[in-house]
């Protein structure tokens, strides 16, 4: 057995295909209340287990990051239209099923409260405390006319593109598209 | 070349980032018929190829695991409402598109039968025979008021939380959110 | 330290759990315009970063690969019905949210054009140039009665089953279900 040669070959093999980190990368594409609940439960759960977590908000998901109390000026007409049509923040999102003209969302929230499940606001705060990173898709912000100033306050919220997501996901043990 | 040192460094590298097992972990979040078909085709396909498979049913997905023939007593009013509004078992689920007041689902099922594609019932049975593990989300069961006694008979069906999913997914080569 | 023994153990460990390739495998299940945009942005982005990319089109996703200019003969009545009900190509797909009787899709396309984001056609062409592989699900084609002759021209488009996807995904660093 030629130890040096064997060792070099193994090293090369390991370097060409490094295993993944204990890390979770998630694309939050959906604008549905139920999927936001799921994504935050998974993200905070993973962070509590000591995993590194990155949530990449894109498309309809970005609307959930708006702060309903913030106003921005200087939007074009189309941007104002988008702003008005999309839910203003995560608490205004609707269910993907059983919508019942908004009653479904109210019902889920009431039950979550009764059963002592954390609200979206509490889960988002917890995510921030646990160091869950949030990256907001630059192209989506641009297409929908959202400005950074109208998003929620969140520690370490950054703007990024698909390359940001791919770099994070490529070294993650778990990747999900929600 | 210091063989011992090189070997230790490589060992450390491998241990800090272990490659994944030939294993598939899937979150079945959706309550749609078409997504249930897809999830079972993927699960049984992977198991037939010798992969370890875990399906984690959560949110609307849990309703698909109810057995329409089973009745449970002692539910609260809200739990009864949920029970009545959600599909009673996988054969009552609807399509995510082309619903056409239920006709779409009937059409897909008729074509699957004609083309000799296994039904949801047959695929679920096959999954059980192939050793596909099913974990049902504890929090979803609690929120929707579903009891273990009203779920289908399935070998090795267990109840678990997000930590269960994350532990399985973290060592899996493939993870999907459906 | 028994070098030979240590080396053998490490080799075995690496071989039993090889790390993943710089590769992205994606199931395109959805028939929604917004998800097609997302899948193509991710696919072309990954390919541009030098990753190997495979898109596996299944269920509603397959309809987006139809070429609206192509006609095929010899379809059964049910196959003709499916053909008529499903969108004829990616430019006829609708949004998953904010449909507004088709106005939402037109609005998104207009904004994408104004902001100089590539159209679905341009992104598909780019994907082909970058070597993104497209595999179309055989069972979906069969169920919906689609023929290979009615699909778009795309370099290296092939037909495959779930085993094809699982083999690709199993060695990929990133897998997504869209």
Image: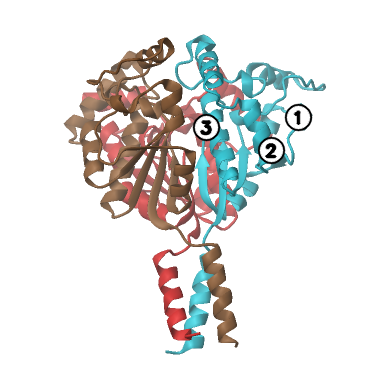
Chain colours: A red, B cyan, C brown
Q: Residue furthest right?
A: B73
C-alpha span from label 3 to label 2: 16 Å
What residue does disc 2 label?
B128
Q: Residues within 10 Å of mark 3 (few under 14, many from 20)?
A: some
Q: Is residue B137 visible?
A: no
Q: Position of residue B68 (x, y in %)?
A: 72, 20
Q: Residue at x 31, y 49 (%)?
A: C46
Same chain for mark 3 and mark 2? The answer is yes
C-alpha span from label 1 to label 3: 26 Å
Q: Residue at x 73, y 29 (%)?
A: B152
Residue A75 in the figure: left or right of residue A148: left
Nearer to me, B114 or C13: B114
- From this view, report whether residue A15 is shown above or below residue C178: below
Image quarter in which the N terminus of chain B is found: bottom left
Numbered badge on residue B38: 3
Disc 2 chain ID = B
Q: Position of residue B175 (x, y in %)?
A: 52, 46
Disc 1 chain ID = B
What residue does disc 1 label?
B147
Q: Residues within 10 Å of mark 1 (few under 14, many from 20)?
A: some
């Amino acid at each position: 057995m030629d130890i040096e040669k064997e060792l070099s070959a193994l090293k090369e093999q390991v370097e060409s295909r490094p295993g993944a980190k204990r890390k979770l990368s998630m694309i939050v594409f959906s604008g549905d209340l139920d999927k936001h609940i799921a994504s935050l439960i998974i993200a905070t759960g993973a962070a509590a287990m000591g995993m590194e977590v990155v949530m990449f908000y894109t498309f309809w998901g970005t609307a959930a990051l708006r702060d309903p109390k913030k106003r921005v000026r200087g939007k074009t007409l189309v941007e104002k239209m988008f702003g008005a049509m999309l839910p203003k923040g995560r608490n205004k999102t609707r269910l993907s099923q059983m919508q019942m003209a908004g009653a479904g969302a109210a019902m889920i929230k009431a039950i979550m409260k009764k059963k002592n499940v954390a609200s979206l606001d509490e889960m988002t705060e917890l995510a921030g405390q646990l160091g869950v990173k949030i990256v907001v898709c630059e192209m989506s912000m641009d297409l929908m006319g959202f400005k950074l100033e109208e998003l929620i306050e969140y520690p370490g919220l950054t703007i990024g593109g698909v390359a940001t997501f791919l770099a994070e996901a490529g070294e993650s043990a778990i990747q999900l598209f929600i």
